[in-house]
Each structure stands twice: as C-alpha cells, then as structure tokens.
C-alpha cells in the first residue's frame, strides 16, 4: 500500500499549509527506519518533510503540489513498480530546478537525469544535512 505523510493535509489529500516553496522535501524510502532517520535529519535543518513509501506515491505528490517541493530524496530501490531513477526523471522533467538526490547501496546508479545527485549508502548524516542546507540557501 502506498502512503505519504505530510505536515498538514486537507481532506482531498493535497499537502498544504506549513510547507513553503523553499524548504519542502519529499523523502521516498520503503525502509521505514531509514525514511524516518532522513526525515528527522531534514526536519532539523528546518525542512518540511513529506514521507513516501513508493515512487508512485511521491509522483502523486509532485503532480498535486510539486511547485512547492524544493527537493526529492529517494532510494533507488522502492516498493511498487517504479524505482527511484524513474521518479528522479519525473521530478527533473517537470521541475528542472528541483534538487534530486538518489541514494543506493550500489556503487553507482546508471541512468540518472542531468542534475540529479547520487549519494551512496551508507551515507554520513552530515552529508544529508549538507545537501539540505544547499537546497534551502
């Protein structure tokens, strides 16, 4: 089952309210513990976080309110039919200036869209924070 958690959701499922265009990020990770860790780190950097378990759920967030998302942080391998690389392409095609980070336990990930960053696992917490700070400044 796909799901997303946003700081404030209206009765139509469209995130709104606390999120502002310069500090909102979509964390896409099917491993709940890693998703929570990244979300906490980003929230400590004053980012408003939407958590998604699958690329399909994240693509819906982008479709509904992508103009308010400044960053997508996604794992390569996700639950569902779409992977993180496909999500990265959707994000960059729709919003070329959006920061997109794809993370994976693999040494490298082929086929990333131009401008997307690759962050190998295991990553350091400081690396996640550094990327977040670059996004909001």
Image (cartoon, rainbow, N blue to C red):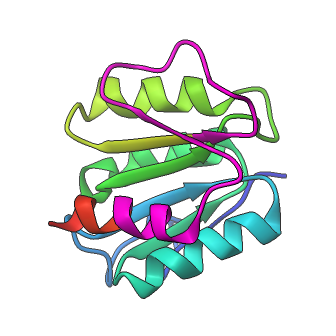
Q: Quadrant of residue 20?
A: bottom left
Q: Quadrant of residue 45?
A: bottom left
**Residue at image coords 21%, 67%:** 136
Q: Which residues are magenta?
A: 103-131
Residue at the limit of the structure toward the top, as seen here: 111
**Residue at image coords 60%, 69%:** 38
Q: Against 115, is 46 above or below?
A: below
Rendering coords of residue 39 (x, y %):
57, 73
Q: Which is more toward the observer, 136 or 16? A: 136
Rendering coords of residue 105 (x, y %):
75, 39
Q: Is residue 63 visible?
A: no
Q: Against 26, is 32 above or below?
A: below
Residue at the limit of the structure toward the left, as seen here: 137
> Going by the image, does 74 lie left or right of 32?
left
**Residue at image coords 26%, 59%:** 135
Rendering coords of residue 63 (x, y %):
41, 41
Residue 122 magenta-highlighted: yes
> Going by the image, does 80 lie left or right of 87?
right
Q: Quadrant of the C terminus?
A: bottom left
> Going by the image, does 8 lie left or right of 27?
left
Q: Is residue 37 visible?
A: yes
Q: Against 102, is 128 above or below?
A: below
Residue 129 magenta-highlighted: yes
Q: Quadrant of residue 102?
A: top right
> Going by the image, does 70 lie left or right of 55?
left
Q: Which is more toward the observer, 116 or 58? A: 116
**Residue at image coords 33%, 29%:** 92
């Amino acid at each position: 089952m796909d799901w997303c958690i946003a700081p404030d959701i209206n009765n139509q499922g469209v995130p709104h309210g606390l999120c502002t265009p310069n500090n909102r990020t979509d964390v896409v990770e099917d491993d709940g513990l890693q998703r929570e860790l990244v979300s906490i780190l980003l929230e400590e950097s004053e980012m408003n976080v939407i958590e998604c378990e699958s690329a399909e759920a994240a693509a819906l967030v982008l479709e509904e309110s992508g103009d308010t998302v400044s960053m997508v942080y996604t794992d390569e391998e996700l639950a569902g039919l779409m992977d993180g690389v496909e999500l990265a392409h959707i994000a960059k095609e729709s919003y070329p200036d959006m920061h997109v980070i794809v993370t994976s336990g693999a040494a490298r990930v082929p086929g990333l869209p131009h401008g997307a960053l690759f962050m190998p696992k295991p990553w350091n917490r400081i690396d996640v924070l550094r990327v977040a700070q670059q996004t909001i400044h």
